[in-house]
Amino acid sequence: MKILKLGVLVSGNGTNLQAIIDKSEIGEIPAKVVVVISNTEEAYALHRAKRHAIPAFVVKPKDFPDKRSYEQKMIEILEDYDVGLIVLAGFMKILSPHFIETFRNKIINIHPSLIPAFCGKEFYGMKVHRAVIDYGVKLTGATVHFVDENVDSGPIILQKAVEVEDDDTAETVALKVHQIEHQILPEAIRLFAEGRLRIVGRRVLIER
Ligand code: GAR
């Protein structure tokens, strides 16, 4: 099977990036991370890329006069590396409709809740898990979805739930959610690489 080339966008620790690299290296997914882009040089994810000899770029919005030229730089890099799928793995910037149109149905995102709960502009990273504890829900989880013009709103590929127990804190919930993210994100990439995802309206059908 042809190996799918992945461009991974990150902003932080990069444990999801690591999960993808590890599964790719042991041949569990027919995909390979060919380039990593971060919006900040502080992202630990950049070290992970370097350790695996993956080209990594820092593209910072404030180094460009406007959002269009910032995104154009990322588009150029992703096109140079001929990526077939862009993975937002803890990427904390909102992409413009122009960027999304350039890679229509070729961008997926991992979000740390069961969308449509705890998602949208205000909910990202640890904020999600704090809100989960504050609200008192008994189930949370993670979602992998295609990216469209609105935040966290594209068709859902995979979701998995975890239980919130009485002694859980935002930190322990984050750990549990990360564990399932490391399963469902590589799994969604595998399904995409195998050409088994079909978008029908808001639904993503998985061909068996
Ligand atoms: C992950 O939990 C991911 O779902 C979340 O950031 C974390 C990054 O962890 N993404 C968002 O909140 C996007 N809205 P990582 O850097 O260890 O992969």
Image (spheres, rainbow, N blue to C red):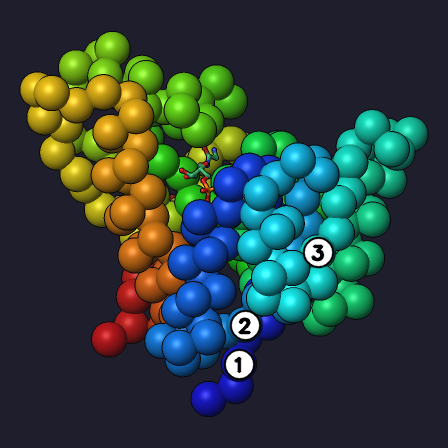
Marked residue nearer the N-terminal end (1 or 3) = 1
Mark 3 neighbour density, 10 Å: few (under 14) some (14–19) many (20 or more): many
Mark 1 neighbour density, 10 Å: few (under 14) some (14–19) many (20 or more): few
Marked residue nearer the N-terminal end (2 or 1) = 1
Q: Which residue has dot 3 on it?
A: 56
Which sits in the foreground, 36 or 85?
36
Q: Which residue has dot 2 on it?
A: 32
Residue at image x 49%, y 54%? 17
Residue 107 in view in this figure: no
Closest to the camera, between mark 2 and mark 3, is: 3
Q: Which residue has dot 1 on it?
A: 3
Closest to the camera, between mark 2 and mark 1, is: 2
Pointer 2 and pointer 1: residues touching (CB < 8 Å)?
yes
Residue at image x 81%, y 57%? 76
Task: Residue type at mark 2: give it.
Answer: Lys
> 95 left or right of 146?
right
Marked residue nearer the N-terminal end (2 or 3) = 2
Closest to the camera, between mark 1 and mark 3, is: 3
Q: Which mark is residue 151?
A: none
Mark 2 neighbour density, 10 Å: few (under 14) some (14–19) many (20 or more): many
> 173 left or right of 2?
left
Cα–Cα span, label 2 and label 3? 14 Å
Task: Residue type at mark 1: give it.
Answer: Ile
Would you say the beta carbon of the disc 3 residue lies within 8 angstroms of ligand 1? no
Cα–Cα span, label 2 and label 1? 7 Å
| Quarter of the rendered structure image containing ligand 1 | top left
